[in-house]
Amino acid sequence: MSKITRPRLEIPFTTFEIVIEALGILSVAAMFIGLIVAFPDLPQVVPMHLSFDGRVDRMDEKIHLIWPPIISLALYILLTLLARFPERFNYAVNISPENAFYQYRNARLFVGVIKAFLSFWASAFFLYTLRITGGLGTRVPFVGPALFVFMASTLILTVFFMRRALRNS
């Protein structure tokens, strides 16, 4: 197996990347803040999972609500670390000194957008779960459609960034 060597470049962050990063961080922080604010008033047993039609189908002790924010933070950190090494990514095009800057920036932007996107969706579902847990409803009417929008949006983002990479190879 041959080792592929690619140029290591220092690529400055664009304003858009900084904004996306801030939105992702705010989404993860909202989960922790929401949990800290709501936790004292929550009942001992809370909803932990919603069915596709938005009904609560699993209950558990409230201490387990700490896991979604922790997992979101861990995923955010891992993706942030991954984005620091775009020269190690798999690409659909050959990386050359001529196209490395564009391809690396595009790949790093893709990871940043996906990171913010995942953080936003995780935060939205988690905060809505806290809302239900606090007695402000018994059902999330939009789980099925929201999951469809989430999956379709993820696919659209992937296709968008892949087309950018192939167009500028």
Image (cartoon, grey):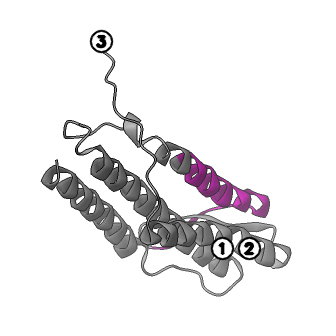
Which residue is disc 1 drawn over?
30
The answer to whether the residue labelled 2 contacts the one labelled 3, judged by CB atoms less than 8 Å apart, is: no
Looking at the image, the residue that sits furthest to the bottom is 136
The answer to whether the residue labelled 3 contacts the one labelled 1, judged by CB atoms less than 8 Å apart, is: no
Identified at 28% across, 65% down, the residue is 152
Q: CA distance from mark 2 to mark 1?
A: 5 Å
Q: Which mark is residue 33?
A: 2
Where residue 148 appears, as percent x and y from the top left, is 32, 68
Left or right of residue 163: residue 42: right
Q: State the residue in front, 55 or 40.
A: 40
Location of the N terminus (image quadrant): top left
The answer to whether the residue labelled 2 contacts the one labelled 1, judged by CB atoms less than 8 Å apart, is: yes
Q: Nearer the viewer, mark 2 or mark 3?
A: 3
Q: Earlier in the sequence, mark 3 or mark 1?
A: 3
Question: What kind of element bears circle 3?
Answer: loop
Q: CA distance from mark 3 to mark 1?
A: 45 Å
Segment tinted magenta in the rendering: 54-78
Magenta span includes 68: yes
Identified at 73% across, 59% down, the residue is 66
Where residue 122 appears, as percent x and y from the top left, is 53, 65
Identified at 20% across, 58% down, the residue is 164
